[in-house]
């Protein structure tokens, strides 16, 4: 019962935080605005609790008046120096949006090297002995050549293997509930992982909401996102 009470408390805290739109308004420089958007959307990856995230950069004006799609086209090459621990791969570019896979090289390599993940990817048509680059390349081709996401994409972005396998119909487990993804079988570990993801996003959102330039300096070892401030906080460094 305590877990679900904590989950509701976290959701209330999240609702009290400024929205993404409000956060982006606090960064007047266009590159800072784009950087803040990616940092917020990749909080779980930067924390080391998720290997990758999908981010859609939509071609429309935000409430602050900026168009992130246009900012991406103009400033994406400058992001590498600002986000040294984040690799960004363009999976699809359309007139209405650009789809990015943002990941930590070490985390995704360890994650995709897991024997269970490899088995599921092989069943989905990937070569069993493919390199990480080959796996990402095949994923890119499948997304670029189709109008929808391949179901196995959940494996790349760190959703629990049992949930992805059940969603793909590779194993039989009863549908249990829906959070950030569809959960099958015993939900406890999946819900715990989803809560970790939410806590990372909540913490990063609170830091970015200050509008301080230092919030964008992830290479700084004293960045508050990576500082362990309470015995109840999650450890934000990769295990």
Image (tube, rainbow, N blue to C red):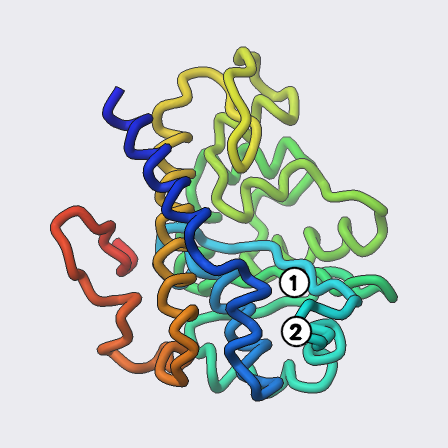
Q: Which residue lies under the disc numbered 1?
A: 100
Q: Which residue is drawn at the image coordinates 69% and 80% (left, top)?
A: 71
- Tell me, for residue 154, which label it has, or none: none
Query: Which circle's residue, 2 or 1, is located before the other in the chain?
Result: 2
Q: Nearer the viewer, residue 150 or 184?
A: 184
What SS does tag 1 mark?
strand
Q: Nearer the viewer, residue 107 or 181?
A: 181
Q: CA distance from mark 2 to mark 1?
A: 22 Å
Q: What is the x, y in percent for residue 179? A: 51, 32
Q: Which residue is drawn at the image coordinates 57% and 88% (left, top)?
A: 29
Residue 147 in the image: above or below residue 218: above
Q: Mark 1: give few (<14), some (14-19) or many (20+) Cα within 10 Å.
A: some
What SS does tag 2 mark?
loop
Q: What is the x, y in percent for residue 37? A: 55, 69
- Quadrant where the N terminus sits is top left
Query: Viewed as shown, does residue 126 lie left or right of 19?
Result: right
Q: Which residue is drawn at the image coordinates 47% and 83% (left, top)?
A: 82
Q: Mark 2 or mark 1: which is in front?
A: 2
Residue 22 in the image: above or below residue 78: above
Q: Which residue lies under the disc numbered 2?
A: 64
Residue 24 in the image: above or below residue 52: below
Q: What is the x, y in percent for residue 211? A: 43, 77
């Amino acid at each position: 019962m305590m877990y679900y009470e904590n989950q509701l408390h976290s959701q209330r805290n999240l609702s009290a935080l400024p929205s993404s739109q409000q956060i982006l308004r606090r960064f007047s420089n266009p590159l800072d605005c784009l950087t803040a958007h990616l940092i917020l959307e990749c909080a779980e990856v930067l924390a080391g609790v998720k290997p990758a995230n999908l981010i859609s950069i939509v071609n429309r004006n935000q409430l602050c008046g900026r168009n992130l799609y246009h900012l991406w086209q103009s400033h994406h090459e400058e992001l590498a120096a600002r986000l040294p621990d984040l690799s960004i791969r363009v999976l699809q570019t359309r007139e209405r949006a650009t789809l990015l896979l943002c990941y930590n090289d070490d985390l995704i390599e360890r994650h995709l090297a897991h024997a269970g993940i490899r088995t599921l990817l092989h069943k989905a048509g990937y070569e069993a002995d493919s390199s990480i680059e080959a796996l990402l390349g095949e994923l890119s081709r499948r997304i670029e050549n189709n109008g929808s996401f391949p179901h196995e994409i959940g494996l790349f972005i760190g959703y629990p293997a049992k949930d992805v396998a059940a969603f793909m119909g590779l194993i039989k487990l009863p549908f249990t509930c829906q959070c950030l993804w569809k959960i099958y079988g015993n939900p406890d570990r999946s819900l715990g992982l989803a809560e970790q993801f939410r806590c990372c996003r909540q913490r990063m959102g609170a830091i970015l909401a200050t509008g301080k330039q230092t919030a964008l300096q992830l290479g700084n070892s004293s960045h508050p996102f990576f500082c362990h401030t309470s015995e109840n906080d999650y450890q934000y460094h990769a295990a």
